[in-house]
Image (cartoon, grey):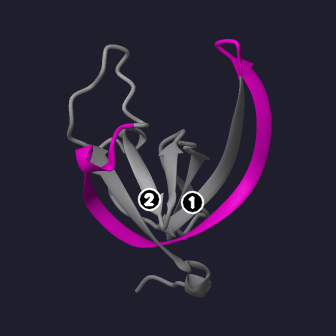
Amino acid sequence: MAKFDDAGELDRRVHFERYIGEVDIVGDFQFAEDDNWEEVFSTWASVRTISSREFYAAGQEQNEVTHNVKIRRRTWDRDVTAMRIVCGEKIYRPMSPPIDLGADRVYQQIKVAEVWR
């Protein structure tokens, strides 16, 4: 039986969604309307801020806040980096595939960036 010593740490309900609308010319869909997304699954998670930075891209100042999303381990039938994660009013874009935490492989962590609209 799996051991969840710190399961109370998973205090937020998050929703993993995939894009079902048309992709624009550049293939960017992270700012697409909410109607073009459908939920794949939802789960309990902990969302912790890890860093914030400002940078210039395309001649404009940009802000990026990164977080770690910790969930109970699962097997993935879809590419998580092509999804978005919704937690309340906030939307996160996965920056990397999930990684297993610890040798017991009970939890996974996903590094995400907050999407600013």
Q: Position of residue 32 (x, y in %)?
A: 36, 37
Answer above or below: position of 38 versus 30. Answer: below
Residue type (three-letter) at the residue carrying disc 1? Val
Give the crowd class for mark 2: few <14, some 14-19, many >=20 residues within 10 Å: some
User: Which SS class for mark 2?
Assistant: strand
The residue positioned 65% from the left and 53% from the top of the image is 67
Give the crowd class for mark 1: few <14, some 14-19, many >=20 residues within 10 Å: many
* Residue 69 image label: 1
Answer above or below: position of 23 versus 19. Answer: above
Answer above or below: position of 21 versus 7. Answer: above
* Residue 86 image label: 2
Q: Is residue 20 magenta?
A: no
Left or right for 2, reference 102: left
Numbered range of the magenta stretch: 32-60
Prevailing secondary structure of the magenta residues: strand
Answer above or below: position of 78 versus 87. Answer: above
The residue positioned 56% from the left and 80% from the top of the image is 11
Q: Does residue 113 appear in this view?
A: yes
Among the two numbered marks 2 and 1 on one chain, the one whose residue lies closer to the N terminus? 1
Q: In which quadrant of the rendered view does residue 61 lie?
A: top right
The residue positioned 44% from the left and 65% from the top of the image is 73
